[in-house]
Amino acid sequence: MKTRTFLLAMFMLAASSVVMGDGMQYELRVDGLACPFCAYGIEKKLKKTTGVKTVAFDLEAGKVIVTTEESARFTEDEMERLIEEAGFTLRGMTERELP
């Protein structure tokens, strides 16, 4: 009986995580993002932010790609503040919900 209850609980947990999704992905266009040292400064700032899961970069395009935990959402103003605190300028942001 305990095994059956445990398996049911595990199934419900797995099903709820599928329904809730994996968070958000933000693509940030950042002025001045030209080298790995610049990227490191931004990554360091963003990784300290609650809800940020991963930070990736496209240096040629000047883009920062941020993925968040399930419950984390950021406004453009919040991202702009974080990027400015890292010493850069946010020029635009797109967002999409991850499946």
Image (cartoon, rainbow, N blue to C red):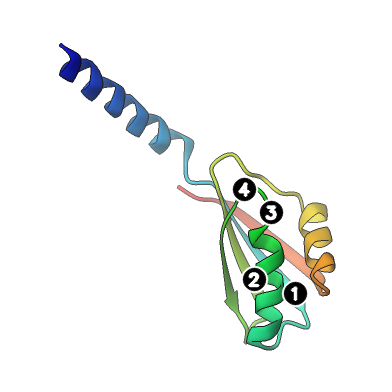
Residue at coordinates 63% horizontally, 44% vertically from top-left? 72
Decide: is 63 above or below 79.
below
Please identify, in this view, whether the residue under mark 4 or under mark 1 is nearer the observer: 4
CB under 8 Å between callouts 3 and 4?
yes
Q: Residues within 10 Å of mark 3 (few under 14, many from 20)?
A: few
CB under 8 Å between callouts 3 and 2?
no
CB under 8 Å between callouts 1 and 2?
yes
Q: Residues within 10 Å of mark 4 (few under 14, many from 20)?
A: some
Which image quadrant for residue 80? bottom right
Q: Amino acid at mark 2?
A: Val
The residue to which callout 4 is attached is 51
Q: Is residue 29 left or right of residue 91?
A: left
Residue 4: x, y in percent?
17, 17
Residue 60: x, y in percent?
62, 87
Which image quadrant for residue 88? bottom right
Q: CA distance from mark 3 to mark 2?
A: 15 Å
Please identify, in this view, whether the residue under mark 3 or under mark 2 is nearer the observer: 3
Q: CA distance from mark 3 to mark 1?
A: 18 Å
Residue 44: x, y in percent?
67, 68
The residue to which callout 3 is attached is 49
Callout 3: helix, strand or loop?
loop
Q: Amino acid at mark 1?
A: Val
Give the quadrant of the N terminus: top left
Residue at coordinates 66% horizontally, 45% vertically from top-left? 73
Residue at coordinates 48% horizontally, 46% vertically from top-left? 22
- Ranked by sequence position, the earlier of labels 1 and 2 is 1
Callout 1: helix, strand or loop?
strand
Residue 68: x, y in percent?
58, 51
CB under 8 Å between callouts 4 and 2?
no
The residue to which callout 2 is attached is 64
Q: CA distance from mark 4 to mark 1?
A: 20 Å
- Ranked by sequence position, the earlier of labels 4 and 1 is 1
